Amino acid sequence: MAEFDLAVRGGQVATGFGTVRCDVGVKDGRIVALAERIADAAQVVDAGGLLVLPGGVDSHCHIEEPARGGYVGAGEGEPPLTVNEETFATASASAFAGGTTSVVCFIPQWKGFGVWDRYVDYRARAAKGMLDHSFHQIISDPTDAVMDEEVPRVVAEGVRSLKVFLTYEPLHLSDAQYLRVLTKARELGCLVTVHCENYAAISWRTEELLKHGMTAPKYHAWSRPPVVEREATHRAIALAELVDQPIQVFHVSCAEAAEEIARAQARGVKVWGETCPQYIALTAADMDRPGFEGAKFMCSPSPRTTEEHARIWEMIRRGTLDVVSSDHCAFSFAGDKGKGQNGRSAPFRDIPNGIPGFAARLPIMFSEGVSKGRISLDDFVRLTSTNPARLMGLAPRKGMIAVGSDADLALWDPAKKVTITNALMQHAIDYTPYEGLEVTGWPVTTIRRGEVVMREGKVQAEPGTGRFLPRAPYDFIRPRGVVPNGFDPAPAPR
């Protein structure tokens, strides 16, 4: 009987802290040896001429997420549901095609409803996919029953992060509600992740634009300029600092918001910043296309300018933005259930926000970052795998090539030139906003827990093989113990 189940031979192994040519030995789905030569293996994958990277960890993505109202039946007493077009099966295929092996996605909450039933439902949906997965719990209605009874129950199941929105109807929270979530998260030992845009400012500016007949998709960017992101980022950090609760600011699109994070980090505040490929590859000008075409590029915060791309790269190099996720939130362009669900002449306010990005995330970041010399290979590994795994409490199991870690690997051809097409993305959506973009560097094989799940673009995993990743308390997000005047009204962390 072979000593190893799998040997990945002859590649340059990139750990995020240096690169070395060695073989990787796998047993029972885990890395058990890194050695100059591993000979005795039941299966061998030749990585000669390739980089061996940790499987990507995408800590911000929306998959098969139920929403209120529509065409899918629900249980008695529940509102009718619509569900994202992207199922866990199609999301898994797209992720594997792009070199990603683990995700953290979102359990919804609707105003007037709890979270436990949604957790049970979503856990069952995710079990049908192939990705290893964990969850954020969205909080849109922090009532006594939800925060004191149901949220602790969900956290006990291994959901270790709460997501809040400071904009969007009907998701946004008031400052008082946000403070309540921060306080409960501190008590339960959770991270809080925040969508930072000012709800009232966007609503006011949107109404003024519509009054002036400015309804086309391009005005989406006008409705939410950088100042509304900067203000909300400042406020989110200030209130978290008041409570002494660690937060991550999602999808930072501009240096103005990143500078608020940098200032807080310099004070020692536990706040982390994330950005996405759309903020270094797309611009607001992409939404200024004839007819409805610009809707393909609408997401929030809005893509900015090419000049802003350079500033985002600088914030990445400084370490202010230390995670790059996809924020995959996908709606098809054709038909009447996606971008066009409110009609193809709908004003920008009524067009669903979000773009697909699973399979494109790693190739775009590698090409624009490593291939063009903006960041190192180690930076790339940390941004897309190691840092999100560490921040989400998934390390060292995920996001690392180390003895004891899961054998999640992406074999990467750094010289391969590929022109992105929608077919290559392998998602359920009928377009990619990156159509025609040429990238240098591409995953040729993806391995999840020692099993080859994608080879040369062909996904070969079986549905239902993904695993839930419960997260226990972890020190990385422990509060600092610093509160104004030494007065701490919040319950001590459990």
Image: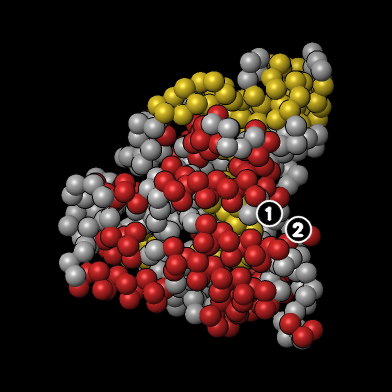
How dense is the environment of label 1, judged by Cα within 10 Å: few (below 14), some, or many (20 and up)? some
Q: Quadrant of the N terminus?
A: top right
Residue appearing at x 54%, y 20% in the figure: 415
Kindly indicate the quadrant of the structure image that contains residue 481: bottom right
The residue that label 1 is drawn on is 391
Residue 156 in view in this figure: no
Determine the CA span between mark 1 and mark 2: 7 Å
Q: Helix, strand, or loop for circle 1? A: helix
* 43 in relation to 106, above or below: above
Left or right for 437, reference 403: left
Q: Tag 2: residue type? A: Phe
Question: Where residue 186 sits in the image (x, y, percent)?
Answer: 70, 72
Q: Tag 1: residue type? A: Leu
Q: In which quarter of the image is the C terminus?
A: bottom right
The residue that label 2 is drawn on is 476
Left or right for 89, reference 213: right
Q: Helix, strand, or loop for circle 2? A: helix
Question: Where residue 55 sits in the image (x, y, percent)?
Answer: 63, 36
Question: Where residue 447 sits in the image (x, y, percent)?
Answer: 62, 29
Question: Where residue 50 sits in the image (x, y, percent)?
Answer: 63, 20
Residue appearing at x 44%, y 67% in the figure: 227
Which residue is most to the front? 307
Residue appearing at x 39%, y 56% in the figure: 302
Q: Which of 196 and 126 is in front in this view?
A: 196
The answer to the question of whether label 1 and label 2 lie on touching residues, with beta carbons closer than 8 A, is yes
Kindly indicate the quadrant of the structure image that contains residue 119: bottom right
* 112 in relation to 216, above or below: below
